[in-house]
Image: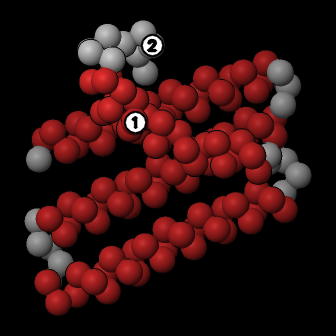
Amino acid sequence: MQEFFLARKKIIRGAIDLMIICSMVSIVLKRWDFAFGFLLGTMLSIFNFKILASDILKICTLQVKKEKIKGYIFVRYGVRYLLTFLILFISLKNQNINIYTCLAGLFFIKFSALWNYSLKYFLGGRVWVSL
């Protein structure tokens, strides 16, 4: 169980590091809409990731009754995608948030997981950039 929480923390930390780097570059370029897009997209992806991680933990430890698991997963899945749609709609309508950087921010959690748990092993343990 401890390994689960450490992995979750490491993935989230990697996504936050990516967001900070991209936001700093955006601020240096004086593109505040890019920085807000990265921030909003990354925060949404981290929130969705935490919801998914807690769902996996609850289902694997059987804190949800077996009869209700299907409905529980369906409702939580719907909530995550409704929230994603709502944030993307807001970023599309708001001039101060860039939709493309918001979409990029949504992928930062996936890039972090891919980097931390796939690419490192394919590269033979050699890591050029540590997130």
Tag 2's secondary structure? Answer: loop
Q: Is residue 98 left or right of residue 85?
A: right
Q: Residues within 10 Å of mark 2 (few under 14, many from 20)?
A: few
Residue appearing at x 19%, y 69% in the figure: 59
Total labels drawn: 2
Q: Which residue is mark 1?
A: 114
Tag 1's secondary structure? Answer: helix
Residue appearing at x 32%, y 38% in the figure: 9
Is residue 37 something one can see in this rendering? no
Please tell me the numbered disc located at residue 124. Answer: none
Give percent across and percent down for residue 100: 75, 46
Distance in Å between CA atoms under marks 2 and 1: 14 Å
Q: Are marks 2 and 1 in contact (CB under 8 Å)?
A: no
Is residue 107 something one can see in this rendering? yes
- Earlier along the polypeptide chain: callout 2 or callout 1? 1
Please tell me the numbered disc located at residue 129. Answer: 2
Give percent across and percent down for residue 37: 71, 44
Q: Amino acid at mark 1?
A: Leu
Q: Amino acid at mark 2?
A: Val
Examine the rendered structure and indicate whether residue 32 appears above or below residue 27: below
Examine the rendered structure and indicate whether residue 42 appears above or below residue 64: above
Q: Is residue 65 left or right of residue 45?
A: left
Give percent across and percent down for residue 25: 72, 21
Q: Nearer the viewer, residue 67 or 1?
A: 67
Q: Quadrant of the C terminus?
A: top left
Residue at the extreme bottom? 67
Give percent across and percent down for residue 4: 19, 44
Examine the rendered structure and indicate whether residue 65 appears above or below residue 87: below
